[in-house]
Amino acid sequence: MVFGFFKKLIKYYVDKLIHWLRMKRLDLQLESEVKKYHQKLDKKVKKPKIVQSGKFGENGWSISIGNVDDKDTEN
């Protein structure tokens, strides 16, 4: 009777371990697929160019993102 209990207990924890390992494998596969997707997306999407002229707080300081012409914001 005691051996049957230990046998069921060991089987329970082995099943839990196998389930955990499967979930970890799935998680790693999903992370890999998402990383590949983001790499493909980064190649397709043009990132804006950020240009800063002058120092922050000085007269005439400006920042441009992309092809923005912000001449009208100068003092």
Image: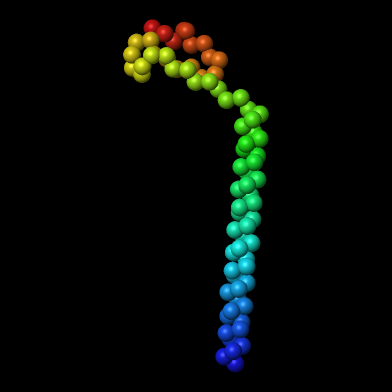
Q: Quadrant of the N terminus?
A: bottom right
* Residue 67 position within the rendered picture, expressed as x and y whole percent measured from the top left: 55, 15
Residue at coordinates 44% horizontally, 10% vertically from top-left?
A: 73
Residue at coordinates 57% horizontally, 84% vertically from top-left?
A: 6
* Residue 68 position within the rendered picture, expressed as x and y whole percent measured from the top left: 53, 14
The reply, left or right, for residue 22 in relation to residue 62 is: right
* Residue 71 position within the rendered picture, expressed as x and y whole percent measured from the top left: 47, 7
* Residue 75 position within the rendered picture, expressed as x and y whole percent measured from the top left: 38, 7
- Residue occupying the far bottom of the picture: 1
Asked if 57 appears above or below 37 in the picture, the reply is above
Counting labels gives: 0
Residue at coordinates 61% horizontally, 54% vertically from top-left?
A: 27
Asked if 74 appears above or below 37 in the picture, the reply is above
The reply, left or right, for residue 66 in relation to residue 18 is: left
The reply, left or right, for residue 16 in relation to residue 62 is: right
Asked if 40 appears above or below 16 in the picture, the reply is above
- Residue occupying the far left of the picture: 58
Residue at coordinates 63% horizontally, 47% vertically from top-left?
A: 32
